[in-house]
Image (cartoon, helix red, strand yellow):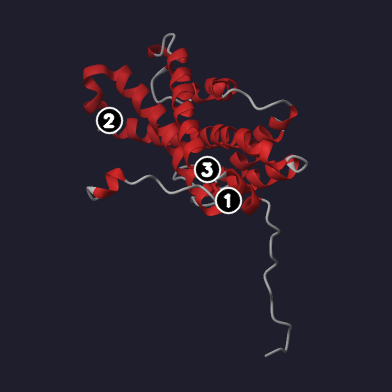
């Protein structure tokens, strides 16, 4: 990154490609921040030594990959809230397309090492179910979005259960505060009208030449 890049505003989120990148990078950051910050705090002064242990690094990878769909669901729901008012009458289609974008983001990644071959199939089905009902009520306050899944994220932390104590609240609050910061960024960068227009744009079928054609 050059010096001038530090003062440039991040690009707007005004099309599907930019939104997919936002969902991906921010879901990855959310889960990684949660796993690493909690583990480092729990390990205390021994955190550097712990992070070099092969078994711990393997446990971190398990937590990150299994936590990624949880974080992605939180980010998608956070994005859906401010976009919903821009698509009055087409809310259900917006949600369907957003779920499709989330699935496309997941498909960027191969099956993690050591996981079953249907790992992403199972996680994608879970994510679809997780998001299917978010329009049954008004959009939640962003700080409340992680509440339903914070326990599942906490259970993935690569720290032995006997050492966790009452740390669930710490992990939950990390998720809430980081998601709130992401929502603020999204509000600053998103061009809602242009973005929903691209999300809801008709899909164009791939043209396949007729058999025997030139």
Q: Residues within 10 Å of mark 2 (few under 14, many from 20)?
A: some
Q: Secondary structure at mark 3?
A: loop
- Which of labels 1 and 2 is toward the front? 1
Q: Which mark is residue 104?
A: 1
| Residue beneath the point at 51% across and 33% down | 71
Q: Is residue 63 visible?
A: no
Element under disc 2: loop
Residue 33 vs 172, above or below: the answer is below
| Residue depicted at 48% across the width and 19% down the height | 172
Using the image, determine if residue 73 lies above or below residue 47.
below
Estimate the x, y position of residue 206 in percent, counting from the top left: 67, 70
Identify the residue position indicated by label 2 in the image: 51
Give how far across and how far down residue 40 sits, in percent: 30, 23
- In this image, 60 relative to 144: left or right? left
Residue farthest along the top direction in this orientation: 166
Q: Is residue 125 visible?
A: yes
Check disc 1: other Cα within 10 Å, few if <14, some if 14-19, many if 20+.
some
Residue 190: numbered disc: 3
Question: Mark 3 or mark 2: which is in front?
Answer: 3
User: Secondary structure under badge 1?
Assistant: helix
Looking at the image, residue 6 sits to the left or right of residue 74; the answer is left
Which quadrant: the C terminus?
A: bottom right
Earlier along the polypeptide chain: callout 3 or callout 1?
A: 1
């Amino acid at each position: 990154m050059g010096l001038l890049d530090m003062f440039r505003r991040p690009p707007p989120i005004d099309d599907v490609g930019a939104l997919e990148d936002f969902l991906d990078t921010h879901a990855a950051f959310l889960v990684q921040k949660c796993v690493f910050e909690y583990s480092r705090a729990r390990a205390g002064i021994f955190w550097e030594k712990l992070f070099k242990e092969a078994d711990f690094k393997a446990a971190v990878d398990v937590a990150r990959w299994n936590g990624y769909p949880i974080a992605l669901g939180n980010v998608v729901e956070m994005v859906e809230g401010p976009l919903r008012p821009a698509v009055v009458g087409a809310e259900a289609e917006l949600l369907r397309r957003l779920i499709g974008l989330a699935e496309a983001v997941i498909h960027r990644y191969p099956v993690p090492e050591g996981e079953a071959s249907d790992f992403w199939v199972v996680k994608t089905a879970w994510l679809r179910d997780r998001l299917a009902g978010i329009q049954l009520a008004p959009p939640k306050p962003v700080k409340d979005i992680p509440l339903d899944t914070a326990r599942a994220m906490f259970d993935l932390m690569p720290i032995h259960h006997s050492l966790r104590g009452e740390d669930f609240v710490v992990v939950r609050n990390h998720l809430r505060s980081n998601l709130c910061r992401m929502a603020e960024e999204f509000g600053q960068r998103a061009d809602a009208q242009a973005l929903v227009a691209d999300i809801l744009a008709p899909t164009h079928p791939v043209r396949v030449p007729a058999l025997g054609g030139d």
